[in-house]
Amino acid sequence: GAVVSQHPSRVICKSGTSVKIECRSLDFQATTMFWYRQFPKQSLMLMATSNEGSKATYEQGVEKDKFLINHASLTLSTLTVTSAHPEDSSFYICSARTPGTGYTFGSGTRLTVV
Amino acid sequence: QKEVEQNSGPLSVPEGAIASLNCTYSDRGSQSFFWYRQYSGKSPELIMFIYSNGDKEDGRFTAQLNKASQYVSLLIRDSQPSDSATYLCAGFSGTYKYIFGTGTRLKVLA
């Protein structure tokens, strides 16, 4: 089946630094990638929708300058958390619409900002 | 406010029993619904989807949709301890977005 590869799976960074998370679609082209954030024991909250070759659409309350999304090719979308703070510590997950039906999630990235 | 609501649980059922997970939604424009299973610390994985009124069966899982009542459910027959996880209901709106419920934690007792 369709696979979305997400890296890194875990990252610990110092406060004030930036972290890049990559999601690659394997064996299919992902024209649209969704980025979610999930805090412990809470549901997935959509942060933004990225479309290949155009600017991402951010959900209300999500800072576009802090969470930079790039979708430069049909198989790669990246999320960069800039000037990370401890409150940005969360589980970040990407998702792409896959051929047929449904959406496939990446394996997630556990970000810890210390 | 467009919402998908689930009871957070935990829902505890004995091994071999039927687990019934419920979900209600407020957006009548939602076209299809998905059930995902999420183990702790892992990404969600799709169990099944449904977009027509009625029942849809896939192995031990049956999804039920009632658009008039804005209600979706997932039945798990012959529940196994390995089914213990959080089950997320998601509605897919006309704006091509998932709206996720908060999830129901299921515990299957051996």
Image (spheres, rainbow, N blue to C red):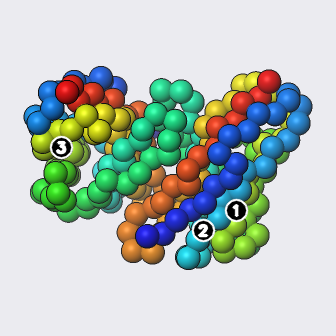
At mark 1, the secondary structure is: strand
Identify the residue at horizontal 50%, vertical 45% (top origin).
B43
Three-letter amino acid code of the residue under disc 3: Ile
Quadrant containing the N terminus of chain B is top left
Chain letter for mark 1: A
Q: Nearer the viewer, mark 2 or mark 1?
A: 2
Three-letter amino acid code of the residue under disc 2: Ser
Q: Are marks 3 and 1 in contact (CB under 8 Å)?
A: no
Identify the residue at horizontal 28%, vertical 31% (top origin).
B106
Left or right: where does residue A88 sit relative to residue A30?
right
Quadrant containing the C terminus of chain B is top left
At mark 3, the secondary structure is: strand
Is residue A90 depicted above or below A60 in this figure?
above
Residue linked to disc 3? B76
Which disc number belongs to residue A25? 2
Q: CA distance from mark 3 to mark 2?
A: 31 Å
Q: Is residue B26 visible?
A: no
